[in-house]
Image (spheres, grey):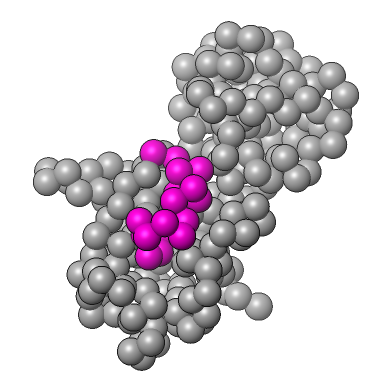
């Protein structure tokens, strides 16, 4: 692992503690809490390894959604954030290369004529998705013809109650819903892969460079893979490719 210098430590942990923002809505990266109420999962494990490399204490800062993490950027609430890397978020934070990837897919109701992800972006097709998620930001940037309906509440409820054509979501979430919503099915393929990365607040260039090296080393030496395997999510998360 790369050795941090004094500037890196000061930029990443000015209080002497690495305050790490966690998106508690991502059940693959934060799989639950231990008996003491501390979040556990690949994301907290990565945060702990970064704090250990810096030689500082770790504080896990819980956020209900990635949107809340983004809003808190620059407000001295967190030092790093484990969050999906998206262009819109890059306006207020800088990202390392991805450490893992998560598939995003579409679920359709019983009787749907849609057969693949390529059938979705067509006139007249309605898509339900949660506002602010990484894959919803991708949809905002890429959907050209379908009617994308973002909701701050439950995208699942909007999909079922309003009879929409498609529900966008992470594969892990949709697999569970497929069992609950009679006749529903996940369309073959994926519409995007969410790139999970480590973010820092703006103007932390030296810290960002060190974090990029750390993430690449953590991928190449099997550390990220071990975190994923330890929490039983290897069938739903994959280690991101090495930075080219």
Apparent side of residue 15 relative to residue 178 in the rendered image (left or right):
left
Q: Single out the residue that lies furthest toward the left.
A: 36
Q: Name the residue located 31 percent from the left edge and 74 percent from the top edge.
A: 14
Q: Name the residue located 68 percent from the left edge and 45 percent from the top edge.
A: 138
On the question of residue 242 being in view, the answer is yes
The C terminus lies in quadrant: bottom right
Apparent side of residue 152 relative to residue 117 in the rendered image (left or right):
left
Measured from the top left, where is residue 181 in percent x and y? 52, 15
Apparent side of residue 8 relative to residue 92 in the rendered image (left or right):
left
The part of the image, by quadrant, that contains residue 90 is bottom right
Q: Name the residue located 25 percent from the left edge and 48 percent from the top edge.
A: 39
Q: Name the residue located 59 percent from the left edge and 54 percent from the top edge.
A: 89
Residue in the foreground of this view, choosing between 204 and 117: 204
Q: Which residues, given as a range, are shown in magenta?
A: 64-81
Measured from the top left, where is residue 128 in percent x and y? 64, 25
Apparent side of residue 160 relative to residue 42 in the rendered image (left or right):
right
């Amino acid at each position: 692992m790369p050795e941090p210098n004094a500037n890196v430590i000061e930029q990443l942990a000015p209080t002497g503690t690495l305050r790490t923002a966690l998106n508690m809505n991502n059940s693959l990266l934060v799989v639950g809490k231990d008996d003491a109420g501390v979040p556990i999962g690949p994301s907290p494990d990565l945060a702990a390894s970064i704090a250990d490399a810096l030689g500082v204490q770790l504080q896990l800062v819980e956020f209900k959604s990635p949107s809340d993490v983004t809003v808190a950027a620059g407000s001295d609430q967190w030092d790093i954030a484990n969050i999906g890397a998206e262009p819109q978020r890059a306006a207020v934070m800088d990202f390392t290369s991805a450490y893992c990837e998560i598939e995003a897919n579409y679920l359709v109701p019983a009787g749907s004529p849609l057969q693949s992800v390529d059938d979705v972006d067509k006139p007249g097709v309605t898509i339900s998705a949660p506002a602010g998620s990484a894959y919803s930001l991708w949809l905002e940037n890429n959907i050209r013809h379908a009617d994308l309906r973002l909701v701050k509440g439950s995208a699942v409820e909007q999909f079922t109650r309003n009879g929409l054509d498609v529900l966008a979501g992470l594969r892990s979430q949709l697999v569970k819903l497929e069992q609950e919503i009679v006749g529903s099915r996940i369309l073959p393929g994926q519409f995007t892969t969410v790139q999970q990365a480590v973010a820092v607040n703006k103007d932390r260039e030296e810290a960002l460079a060190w974090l990029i090296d750390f993430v690449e080393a953590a991928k190449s030496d099997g550390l990220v893979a071990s975190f994923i395997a330890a929490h039983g999510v290897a069938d739903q998360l994959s280690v991101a490719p090495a930075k080219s």
